[in-house]
Image (spheres, grey):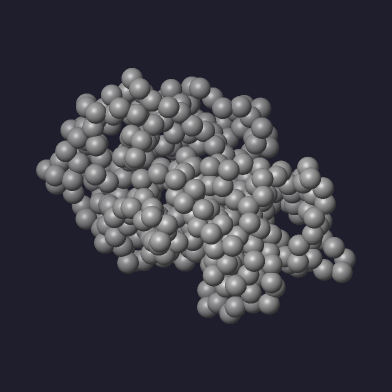
């Protein structure tokens, strides 16, 4: 068994991987240019749901995309200069929108999500921050009373996986969320899940636990990785060259850039997301709420009400767009008549998105001792604990009964 491993990337995926490896008796070093857990996962909407198993490419989504793109408040934006590069990715994305593909992808998402609440509570045990994960529902709210249907494909997938769903009428919705706008007439209530009260603080708490268990965290920027002929890997940072028997590549959207010099091309797109945090909201949400019509999620957290959403494709180095943040503020104003939208902070980060809504987990053919763990898109917070356990199995040679083929990095 390998005695030590270097994990490139200290986001929530890297941290959970590090914790799982330490539990197996493997010494671990995490390397990241920033503070652990304070990049993409920091800005998450906070939903921790075993039932978030519906991929982005669904049947008929191609009909909606043009309308989304021309709507300045729509959930998707593409910078014109990025359209040529995005075209190939977009075609792969749409090809995954058939019902047959959706069902297969959903089953693979279920594998990574099904234990997320239990595993987070396991990792947070004895940190003093167990209360950062709170039991709650996920409410999908509709303005059209007929919109909430249990027989839709997405809900059929959830029910088949074991989810407990309830259709709520106007009165039931008021009971669950009295501060929600009366414009919402019905909802699908997804039970048996939790929400994060501070995703960034969870990252801090788990990184502190990682260090207390003996893990090492190094602040550095990884510039390149190369295999060593005799075995193992060499990686270069601004501090020089280093070697490791095994590398785990968990650098999110920056992972594909490190693989290109090795001749490995992964169709990983940078999908910029935004959130707005209303610091004096004047209202409370008891659960996580998805505005189904406008495609954003709202949740009460320790520091206010967070509204998160939008997907902006513009390339890894594109600057943030103040218009997207302003759009979220405008949309949030329709969430509740009580919401104070005058005081808020904004955030933006890069989601690593692959066209089939599944991450890359596993070794790349011809590159032994390099294990990928990136590309979790919108579901990184939820999929992190299970991804960490799978990577720990792969590193230690532990037999797993899971079908890992859907996540193989060579599947493209």
Residue 160 horizontal side relative to residue 178, left or right? right
Q: Position of residue 259 (x, y in %)?
A: 75, 52
Q: Position of residue 23 (x, y in %)?
A: 54, 70
Q: Residue at x 50, y 45 (%)?
A: 41
Q: How many marks?
A: 0
Residue 237 shows in the view: yes
Q: Residue at x 48, y 26 (%)?
A: 324
Residue at the right extreme of this rendering:
229
Location of residue 25 with respect to 196 vertically, above or below: below
Residue at the left extreme of this rendering:
171
Residue at the top extreme of this rendering:
342
Residue 49's image quarter?
Answer: bottom left
Residue 152 horizontal side relative to residue 33, left or right? left
Q: Nearer the viewer, residue 372 or 11?
A: 11
Q: Nearer the viewer, residue 374 or 334?
A: 374
Residue 280's image quarter?
Answer: top left
Residue 315's image quarter?
Answer: top right
Q: Position of residue 306 (x, y in %)?
A: 37, 36
Q: Position of residue 218 (x, y in %)?
A: 67, 50
Q: Residue at x 52, y 33 (%)?
A: 348
> Where does the N terminus fall, quadrant-wise?
bottom right
Q: Nearer the viewer, residue 236 or 316?
A: 236
Residue 365 shows in the view: no
Location of residue 218 with respect to 335 vertically, above or below: below
> Where does the C terminus fall, quadrant-wise?
bottom right
Residue 159 horizontal side relative to residue 145, left or right? right
Residue 138 horizontal side relative to residue 255, left or right? left
Q: Residue at x 31, y 45 (%)?
A: 288
């Amino acid at each position: 068994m390998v005695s030590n491993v270097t994990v490139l990337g200290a986001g929530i995926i890297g941290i959970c991987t590090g914790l799982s490896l330490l539990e197996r008796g493997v010494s671990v070093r995490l390397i990241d240019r920033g503070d652990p857990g304070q990049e993409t996962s920091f800005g998450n909407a906070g939903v921790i749901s075993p039932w978030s198993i519906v991929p982005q490419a669904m049947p008929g989504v191609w009909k909606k995309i043009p309308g989304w793109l021309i709507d300045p408040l729509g959930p998707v934006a593409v910078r014109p200069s990025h359209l040529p590069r995005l075209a190939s990715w977009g075609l792969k994305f749409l090809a995954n929108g058939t019902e047959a593909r959706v069902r297969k992808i959903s089953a693979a998402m279920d594998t990574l999500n099904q234990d997320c609440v239990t595993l987070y509570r396991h990792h947070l045990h004895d940190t003093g921050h167990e209360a950062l994960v709170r039991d709650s529902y996920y409410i999908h709210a509709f303005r059209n009373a007929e919109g909430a249907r249990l027989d839709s494909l997405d809900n059929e997938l959830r029910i088949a996986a074991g989810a407990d769903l309830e259709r709520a009428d106007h009165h039931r919705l008021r009971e669950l969320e009295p501060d929600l706008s009366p414009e919402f007439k019905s909802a699908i209530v997804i039970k048996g899940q939790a929400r994060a009260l501070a995703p960034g603080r969870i990252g801090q708490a788990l990184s502190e636990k990682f260090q207390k268990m003996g893990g090492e965290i190094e602040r550095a920027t990884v510039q390149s990785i190369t295999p060593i002929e005799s075995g193992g890997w060499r990686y270069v940072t601004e501090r020089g060259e280093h070697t490791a028997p095994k590398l785990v590549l968990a650098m999110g959207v920056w992972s594909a850039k490190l693989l290109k010099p090795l001749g490995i091309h992964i169709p990983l797109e940078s999908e910029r997301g935004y959130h707005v945090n209303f610091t004096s909201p004047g209202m409370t949400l008891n659960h996580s709420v998805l505005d189904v019509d406008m495609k954003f999620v709202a949740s009460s957290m320790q520091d206010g009400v967070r509204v998160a959403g939008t997907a902006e494709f513009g390339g890894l180095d594109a600057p943030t767009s103040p218009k997207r943040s302003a759009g979220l503020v405008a949309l949030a104003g329709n969430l509740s008549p009580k919401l104070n939208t005058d005081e808020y902070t904004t955030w933006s980060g890069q989601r690593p998105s692959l066209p089939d809504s599944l991450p890359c987990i596993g070794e790349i053919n011809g590159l032994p001792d390099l294990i990928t763990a990136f590309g979790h898109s919108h579901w990184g917070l939820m999929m992190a604990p299970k991804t960490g356990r799978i990577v720990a199995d792969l590193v230690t040679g532990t037999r797993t009964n899971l079908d890992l083929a859907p996540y193989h990095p060579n599947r493209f």
